[in-house]
C-alpha cells in the first residue's frame, strides 16, 4: 500500500521555528518527529527558495535541516507550465487574490502532481474547507479530477 502524498507549503515547515505561536509550533514539531515518516513528503522549488530567502541564517539552517532530515523530495519541474496555468485560473476565478499568487501556486503544484494533501498553516487562503471546495470547482472545470485535501498539520496527526 502506498503512503499518502503530502505537499508542504512553506508555513507547514516554518512553524518549526515559530516561537511566537507555541501551539502551532508544537504540532508542527510533533508532525515531523512522530508522523512525517508515514507520508511521502514533497515541496516545490518555490518553497525551497522561500526557505533560502529567510533573513535569519540560524532559522534558515534549521528549516533546511527539517527538509533534509525528513527526506522531503522536491517536485520535478516538468509540469511547471501546467502549474502556472492552473494557478492563474485560481486567481482569475477569485479563489485566491492576485497578491497571493504564491498560495495559488502551492495549490496548483499539489493538484498537478496529484498530492493527497496540501498541508499549510495558512487558514485564510489554503487550509480551510470553503477554499478546498472552490479549488476543487476550478480543478474540475480544468479537467483535474484528482481529489486534493487542504489541511493543517494538526489534521494529519492521529492516535
Image (tube, helix red, strand yellow):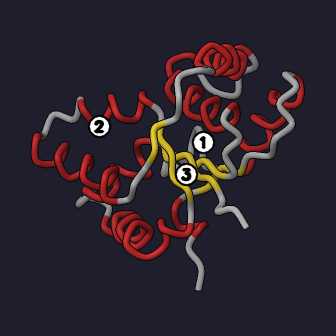
Say which mark, if any, is on residue 71. Answer: none
Position of residue 21 in the picture relative to residue 142 (left or right): left
**Nearer to us: label 1 or label 2:** 2
Label 1 Cα crowd, 10 Å radius (few <14 / some 14-19 / many 20+): many
Q: Residue at x 40, y 64 (%)?
A: 28
Q: Which residue is drawn at 33% across and 28% down?
A: 49
The residue pinned by badge 1 equals: 126
How many marks can you see? 3
Q: Which residue is drawn at 60% across and 47% down?
A: 118
Position of residue 5 in the picture relative to residue 131 (left or right): left
Position of residue 2 in the picture relative to residue 142 (left or right): left
Q: In which quarter of the image is residue 74?
A: top left
The residue pinned by badge 3 equals: 119
Residue 35 position within the rendered picture, expressed as x and y whole percent measured from the top left: 49, 72
Q: Measured along the vertical axis of the image, is residue 122 above or below residue 18?
A: above
Task: Give the mark nearer the N terminus: 1 vs 2.
Answer: 2
Say which mark, if any, is on residue 51. Answer: 2
Residue 34 position within the rendered picture, expressed as x and y whole percent measured from the top left: 43, 76
Image quarter of the C terminus? bottom right
Amino acid at each position: 500500500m502506498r503512503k499518502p502524498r503530502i505537499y508542504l507549503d512553506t508555513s507547514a515547515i516554518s512553524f518549526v521555528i515559530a516561537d511566537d505561536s507555541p501551539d502551532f509550533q508544537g504540532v508542527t514539531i510533533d508532525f515531523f518527529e512522530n508522523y512525517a515518516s508515514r507520508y511521502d513528503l514533497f515541496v516545490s522549488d518555490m518553497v525551497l527558495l522561500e526557505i533560502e530567502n529567510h533573513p535569519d541564517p540560524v532559522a534558515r539552517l534549521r528549516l533546511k535541516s527539517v527538509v533534509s532530515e525528513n527526506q522531503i523530495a522536491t517536485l520535478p519541474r516538468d509540469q511547471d507550465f501546467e502549474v502556472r496555468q492552473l494557478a492563474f485560473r485560481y486567481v482569475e476565478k477569485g479563489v485566491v487574490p492576485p497578491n497571493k499568487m504564491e498560495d495559488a501556486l502551492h495549490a496548483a503544484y499539489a493538484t498537478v502532481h496529484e498530492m493527497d494533501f496540501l498541508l499549510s498553516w495558512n487558514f485564510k487562503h489554503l487550509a480551510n474547507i470553503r477554499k478546498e471546495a472552490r479549488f476543487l470547482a476550478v480543478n474540475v472545470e480544468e479537467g483535474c479530477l484528482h481529489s486534493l485535501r487542504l489541511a493543517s498539520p494538526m489534521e494529519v496527526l492521529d492516535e
